[in-house]
Image: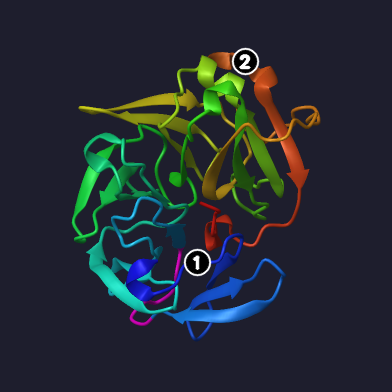
Amino acid sequence: MASAGCDFAPDDVYVLRLHQPIGVTRVTAAGVAQPFAKVAGVDSLNGIAFDTTGRFGSRLLVSGPSHGKVAIVAIDCRGATQVVTGAAPVLEGGLAVAPAQFGDYGGALIAPDELSGKIYAIGPDGTTRTIGDSGLPTGGDIGVEGAGFVPAGFSRGGGAYYADRATTGNPHPGTDSVLRLDATVLTRLGVRDGDLLVATEGGASMVDVRCEQTCHVSTVVDAPSVAHGEGHVVVVANPARVSPPPAEAGGFRLGSGALAAGLAVLVLLALVGGAAVAVARRR
């Protein structure tokens, strides 16, 4: 990052630190954990994403509740912080920065709100605009939680991944799995490179958002499930081909019952909050 005289090291992982001092911990590619930044003026932290287009100065962006609103804070590669806004709407979960070609919202920080179902775009000047309404069920532990953009080349192969966290006593108890939906399935359902995928916490339903001159929201996954989605929707183009295990209850379910064979639950693991991590990618 030119303005700070340094850059984020490729493959380092940045993890939200929810205990005092609240902030971000850096885990190097070698597995060494180090304090990276303190974030003042927030009650906690609940979202993290890298600015991949440069409109926020190519910094790490985090969100957290503050005085009844949400603060968005940008962190440079030396750990210096700057408040983008202290008055964003209530939101939490898997944030994502829109590619430059995402209509009027290119380069904005995209944030879903589980309580209202709205999908927000927050600009580098701190202003918030509403992209649209997900049309999915709303409420705490129910509404839209995760977001991720479809990369170039996805239509030729890849997958969308979403954490399904086991949550005892919840109407959506989850399975401690990582859910996968194949690119072939999503492409047949109308998803295109550059689109935004947004998924709910309760049930892992999903919408596709496409913004050109205007934005259009369409449902791609809507059948009931026991999944408890958390954090980012990670969308990867052309991954290594691995034979997935059979589909299991609690994964993504396809709208209208179509193309269910495209769903697989890939990896069983314990999750500690899927919104808590961002990875510095190679450029």
Quadrant that contains the N terminus: bottom left
The residue type indicated by label 2 comes to: Leu
Residue 45 magenta-highlighted = yes
Q: Secondary structure at mark 1?
A: loop
Residue beneath the point at 65% across and 77% down: 33
Q: Residue at x 59, y 13 (%)?
A: 258
- In depth, the one of 126 and 166 nearer the eye is 126
Main SS of the magenta segment? loop
Q: Nearer the viewer, mark 1 or mark 2?
A: 1
In the rendering, at what x and y percent does residue 49 appear? 45, 57
Query: Residue 26: in sight, yes or no?
Result: yes
Report which quarter residue 264 is drawn in.
top right
Q: Is residue 127 left or right of residue 264?
A: left
Region of the chain picked out in magenta, as a range: 40-46
Residue 250 x, y percent position in the rendering: 67, 36
Q: Report which residue position mark 1 lands on.
A: 8
User: Can you tell which mark lies on residue 224?
Assistant: none
Q: Which mark is residue 259?
A: 2
Q: Is residue 254 visible?
A: no
Specify which label sits upstream in the sequence, 1 or 2. Answer: 1
- How busy is the neighbourhood of tag 2: few (under 14 within 10 Å), some, or many (20 plus)? some
